[in-house]
Image: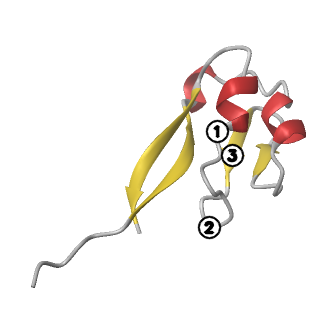
Amino acid sequence: METTIKKKKKAIVTTDMCVACGCCVNICPINAIEIWKGIMAKVHTEKCVGCGKCAKECPASIITIQEVQA
């Protein structure tokens, strides 16, 4: 019997390019993103469901949705 590894999708922020505009924070339906120390967005991966709304909303296109091992 083959073991399947479950993968989940999560938002990843390219932090060195983030300008902390807050667009992702405002659009996240489960409050999984915060502006950290006023300088960049930080995703709380334990909350993130990988819906992709933040990636679509980001004006700098620096948020990606990636598969991570569960």
Residue 27 is situated, as x and y percent measured from the top left of the image, at: 85, 38
Which residue is denoted by mark 1 in the rendering? 52
For image coordinates 59% across by 32% down, the residue present is 15
Marks 3, 2: nearer the viewer: 2
**Figure check: 2 above or below 63:** below
Looking at the image, is 12 positioned above or below residue 44? above
Mark 1: secondary structure: loop
Q: Quarter of the image holding residue 3?
A: bottom left
- Residue that label 2 marks: 46
* In front: label 1 or label 3: 1
The amino acid at mark 1 is Gly
Where, by quadrant of the figure, is residue 32 drawn? bottom right
Q: Residues within 10 Å of mark 3 (few under 14, many from 20)?
A: many
| Residue bearing the label numbered 3 | 42
Under mark 3, the amino acid is: Lys
**Residue 7, position as x, y percentages in the image:** 38, 61
| SS of the residue under disc 2 | loop
Q: Is residue 43 left or right of residue 16?
A: right
Residue depicted at 60% across the width and 50% down the height: 50
Instruction: Identify which amino acid the numbered label 2 is placed on.
Output: Glu
Secondary structure category for the residue under label 3: strand
Q: Please tell me whether residue 21 is drawn above or below residue 47 in the rendered image.
A: above
Q: Residue at x 35, y 68 (%)?
A: 6
